[in-house]
Image (cartoon, rainbow, N blue to C red):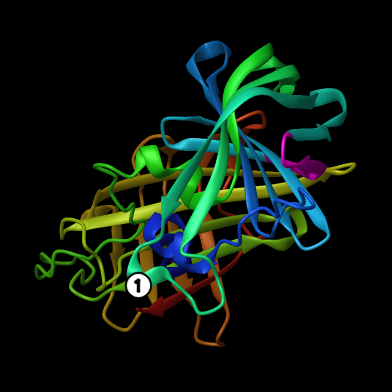
Amino acid sequence: MRFTCLRCFLAFGLLACLLAPVPVSASTGSLASPELAQVSLRGAGGYRIDLFGVIEGAHSTVTVRVAKGSSSADYATRGTITPTAIHASFGKLGKVALRLRSFRVQHARLPKKCETRGSSAVSEARLGVLAGTFRFRGEGGYTHVSVHRVKGGIGEWPAIFASHRKGAKTIYFCATSAGQGPGPGQPRQSNNAFLDASNPGEAISFFANTEPESRVAAGEAVFIASVSERHGQVKISRAVSASGPATDFLFDHALNTATVAPSAPFTGSANFQRNPDGTASWTGDLATTFLGLGEVGLAGPAFKASLKAE
């Protein structure tokens, strides 16, 4: 996964363009694809918990996202979404069985640049109170929530998020280096690079990046670590991110060596070394703590690492 993809996915304006809406059929009451069911609330321990479901073709995916600070965990499973209800089972972790009991219909017009021929320029969503059961408990009880009534909505993306557009900002997960020359004996920092270290056997990945197409302050580096697993029908994807000065990501002009030492929630550091035979080593005590999983090492012989120019 490249940072350009992450940046595009998190830019709501582009997301709305990609998800060109088709209104709900008044005659059949069927949901057009894609649509969204969305609920947000606060879980134990100060965690934000978002429940959302997306219909894509014949299938519906329901996800519980838990987030706090720069850490997040997504729990996704197959579910059922209708124009007024959302249902899904997360096994031992919880269940969702919510139905809109009272709601208002909200419409939103797409920006001109997002309109596509053959699609409606106006999206529709039903916003109100969902009643039933929403129960979730993270591994080890790091957070939990249990409600029987909650505000939310079911409908098309632009209409659901219309009230959040004002003042919204695009989020970028990339940065450019400062362009300052290295000090005596220090690796060069004026290039941009992308470092990827992954452990396919455990589905653990680590990314460190500086990128020239950034719109955030120069002189920063960005780090993202992720781990994924599957428990029965539930896919769990956890991520941790951090940003810091360019000195947290040092690499030479030939891209043969690099050192990363990100700030919290990461600990330790790791070193990349390209060997004469074409292999590469990724060593160190770099680690981080993932929600519901605990501390995980992000360097060692099990990881395959690469360092490329951006």
Q: Position of residue 24 (x, y in %)?
A: 66, 53
Q: Nearer the viewer, residue 177 or 256?
A: 177
Q: Is residue 244 above or below residue 134?
A: below
Horizontal side of 57 relative to 259 (left or right) equals right
Is residue 247 found left or right of 261 in the rendered image? left
> Residue pushed farthest bottom?
277
Residue 219 in the image: above or below residue 113: above
Q: What residue is at 54 percent from the left and 48 percent from the top? A: 124
Crowdedness of circle 1 by 10 Å Cα count: few (<14), some, many (20+)? Answer: few
Question: Nearest the camera: 179 or 163?
Answer: 163
Q: Main secondary structure of the magenta part?
A: strand
Quick check: can you spot residue 274?
Answer: yes
Horizontal and vertical percent position of residue 236:
72, 42
Asked if the magenta segment contains residue 140, the reply would be no
Q: Position of residue 197 (x, y in %)?
A: 55, 63
Q: Residue at x 69, y 40 (%)?
A: 63
Secondary structure at badge 1 equals: helix
Q: Amino acid at mark 1?
A: Lys
Residue range in magenta is 75-84
Residue highlighted by disc 1: 113
